[in-house]
Amino acid sequence: MKPYALLTTEERRAEYAAVLEKYEAYCTEGLSLNMARGKPGKEQLDLVSETLSNLIDYGDYICDGIDVRNYGELSGLPSAKKLFAELLGTQPEEIFVAGNASLQLMYDLISKAHTHGLLHSERPWCKEETVKFLCPAPGYDRHFKICQTFQMQMITVPMTEDGPDMDFVEEAVKDPCVKGIWCVPKYSNPDGIIYADRVIDRLAALKPAAPDFALMWDNAYCVHEFEGDFVPFRDILTLCRECGNADMVYEFASTSKITYPGAGVGVLAASVANQRYLSTLVSFQTIGFDKINQLRHVKLLKDKEQTLALMKRHAEILQPKFHAVLESLKNEIKPLNIAHWTEPKGGYFVSVHAMPGTAKRTVQLMKQAGVILTDAGATYPYGNDPKDSNIRIAPTLPPVGELRTAMAIFCTCLKLSALEALGI
């Protein structure tokens, strides 16, 4: 099949009729498949289920001389802080270990900035006339929702193959109303980009006009390779400190896709001064987080070497799923020249860039056929993809067989929307 743009009108009409017939057949099958969010599949959850649930026995509740069943240790068990400091390349005193979700820590930090201000704020953000936030896009939709919740103005930052457009960022932070930037530095959501060293260096060396500018470093996929060896990453806290920006950065991570999304451990890494300031505020909302769960994770994961060994087992499950997605796109879509896509080596998504003006239509057709994707536009601030092009595919939850079916339908829908856009 030659590229769709080179087809004659008669050829396009014939192709559309054939593809539509195939699509209508899918619609009669009563399918119910979901690729909307990056959820681990059952096989991944089963990797740790028996081990993690049986780690704590009676008489085994003492860790670091602390009875984990009782109140206290607001910033986390010392052994848990040591574990996550090793994973992130930071120091234990820079680690705050909390409940199961790093997203909750991100939301809580922005909430505290809104109500109380951050360490170097002149006033709470709610007292500012305007608060703006930089949002690299395509990006993580929940980052954007946090901004919307607090009525911040989102500024879309173009993404390059090396990370955010730093010329754009450096110019934007000259505005004192710009209070921060969201970053997913390794296997970015959804494009799977690893930020280049030169981009990271420029981010660490930023000189924002706002004294309380927040570099929100969401390192969600820091150990999440599914193909190839572990890719080391640089310690952003040290880099910022060396540039005189020790208190600018807040790094987030969790075990959501290492152990359990619903019962993992979330982590905030920040300077000692930030830890001291934020711990005071947190102390008014809780006496401590789930230390029993922290202990379970310490016993299971042990250290970086053990954690990376577990991630290799995750990779064995994930790799065939990503290959199924990429093989479908290569075989069905590439010859038609109607889309391009990323080929990540880690993370949880494949980012498809369809013909401009066709993403929403493709997602709509998928829904009608019984397959749910993330809403088109969700990877941009305000849900507004200016090209109506980006579609995020989350291959991790369905079994490979269901995934192949879903991708066959996706390719069919992509063809239909492209042919409609070209004219039939």
Image (cartoon, helix red, strand yellow):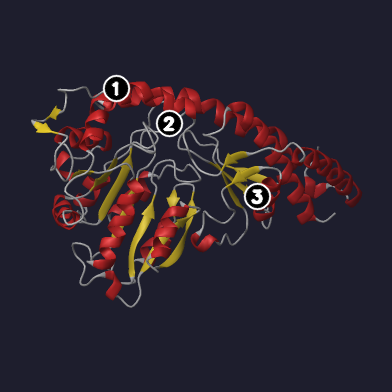
| Residue shown at the point (14%, 36%) measured from the top left | 78
Query: Which quadrant would the C terminus be assigned to in this image?
Result: bottom right
* Residue 76 image offset from top left, x and y in percent: 18, 40
Q: In this rendering, is residue 398 above or below 389?
A: above
Residue denoted by label 1 = 54
Q: Is residue 289 visible?
A: yes
In primary-sequence order, the first of circles 2 and 3 is 2
In primary-sequence order, the first of circles 2 and 1 is 1
| Residue shown at the point (85%, 41%) measured from the top left | 18
Assess disc 2: are there few (<14), some (14-19) or many (≥20) residues with their C-alpha within 10 Å of its C-alpha.
many
Query: Marks 2 and 3, Cα distance to the nearest angstrom?
Result: 28 Å
Quarter where residue 79 is shown: top left
Query: Marks 3 and 1, Cα distance to the nearest angstrom?
Result: 42 Å
Residue denoted by label 3 = 363
* Residue 145 image offset from top left, x and y in percent: 44, 59
Residue denoted by label 2 = 225
Identify the amino acid type marked 3: Val
Query: Marks 2 and 1, Cα distance to the nearest angstrom?
Result: 27 Å
